[in-house]
Image: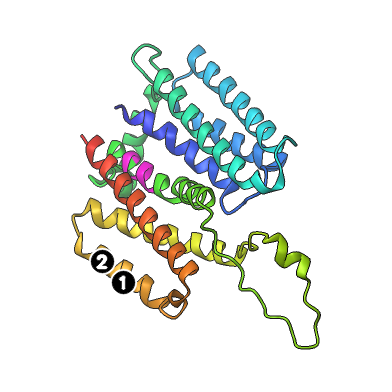
């Protein structure tokens, strides 16, 4: 696959970081920021009618995403699940869109003057002219890293939500002089989700997946065991609770699996 295709996907994935750690519909301001990042990334591409079509499609996708996330047809119970499904579906549309417009049929590519610009810059700095600046390789590595961070977070959270494995808030026992509401006990409502635990888990999950992604790419498989052991050690006492232990175990295995799949995908696409 051409490196310009992965460059486009990286721009999309970077722009989608505007709603990272947010379980609320994207606001108009964040939608505009996301669109500006995407359109700014198109400036290095070759001008033409295909580029104009791509810019119009990106604007339409941003408006569609804002509309789908802010519609009032969902119940509050299914809001998070609906948001994550919408965001993953939009990502699939971005990938399909890029695969068509960056194919040989459409011919969208980098601006020809860009290569000469980097050659001239390489005469003033070793960073651009260094053999390490292998742009196709860097685009692919960055694509995998972005994929296992925010996008993998969406998949893990969606699966945990679907299987009702959200970490519940610890229930407080009633005081001796406090009356017990038998109506709430009879309703058997699902426990309230611990938002703080989710946010902490997302940060830990991102770091965990990035490390596993790096170790798999460099064939350091034994180091993955130390990461999982360190995570279990820090939560040793909390694992005595069965519900929390199941949440941590399934979340950790899902996170590690997605990181390994992301690294395997990058290795398979590596020229």
Q: Residues within 10 Å of mark 2 (few under 14, many from 20)?
A: few
Q: Position of residue 102 (x, y in %)?
A: 39, 21
Residue closest to the eye, 53 or 128: 53
Q: Is residue 105 left or right of residue 174?
A: left
- Residue at position x 54%, y 51% in the image: 161
Q: Is residue 91 left or right of residue 211?
A: right
Q: For the residue labelled by badge 1, is the local secondary structure a helix, a strand or a loop?
A: helix
Q: Position of residue 207 (x, y in %)?
A: 41, 61
**Quadrant position of residue 249:** bottom left
Q: For the residue labelled by badge 2, is the local secondary structure a helix, a strand or a loop?
A: helix
Q: Is residue 126 left or right of residue 21?
A: left
Q: Is residue 8 left or right of residue 124?
A: right
Q: Position of residue 239 (x, y in %)?
A: 43, 74
- Residue at position x 23%, y 37% in the image: 268
User: Can you say whether 253 is above or below 117 in the image?
Assistant: below
Q: Which residues are magenta?
A: 139-145
| SS majority, magenta | helix
Q: Are marks 1 and 2 in contact (CB under 8 Å)?
A: yes
> Label 2: which residue?
225
Quadrant assignment for the C terminus: top left
> Label 1: which residue?
229
Residue closest to the eye, 153 or 271: 153
Q: Position of residue 24 (x, y in %)?
A: 67, 48
- Residue at position x 80%, y 83% in the image: 178
Residue closest to the eye, 84 or 97: 84
Q: Which color scheme did the rendering employ for the protein? A: rainbow
Visible residue check, residue 48: no
């Amino acid at each position: 696959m051409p490196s310009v295709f992965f460059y486009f996907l990286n721009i999309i994935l970077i722009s989608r970081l505007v709603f990272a750690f947010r379980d609320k519909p994207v606001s108009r301001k964040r939608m505009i920021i996301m669109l500006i990042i995407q359109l700014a990334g198109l400036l290095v591409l070759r001008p033409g009618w295909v580029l104009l079509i791509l810019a119009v499609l990106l604007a339409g996708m941003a408006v569609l995403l804002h509309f789908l996330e802010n519609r009032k047809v969902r119940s509050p119970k299914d809001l998070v699940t609906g948001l994550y499904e919408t965001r993953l579906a939009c990502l699939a549309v971005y990938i399909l869109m890029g695969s068509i417009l960056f194919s040989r049929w459409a011919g969208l590519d980098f601006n020809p003057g860009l290569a000469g610009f980097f050659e001239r810059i390489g005469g003033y700095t070793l960073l651009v002219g260094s053999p390490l600046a292998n742009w196709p390789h860097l685009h692919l590595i960055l694509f995998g890293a972005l994929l296992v961070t925010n996008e993998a977070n969406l998949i893990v959270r969606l699966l945990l939500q679907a299987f009702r494995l959200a970490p519940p808030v610890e229930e407080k026992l009633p005081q001796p002089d406090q009356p017990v509401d038998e109506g709430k006990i009879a309703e058997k409502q699902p426990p309230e989700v611990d938002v703080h635990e989710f946010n902490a888990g997302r940060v830990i999950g991102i770091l965990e997946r990035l490390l596993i992604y790096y170790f798999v790419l460099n064939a350091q498989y034994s180091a993955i065991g130390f990461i999982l052991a360190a995570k279990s050690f820090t939560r040793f006492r909390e694992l005595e609770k069965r519900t929390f232990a199941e949440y941590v175990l399934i979340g950790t295995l899902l996170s590690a699996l997605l990181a390994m799949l992301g690294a395997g995908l990058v290795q398979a696409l590596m020229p």
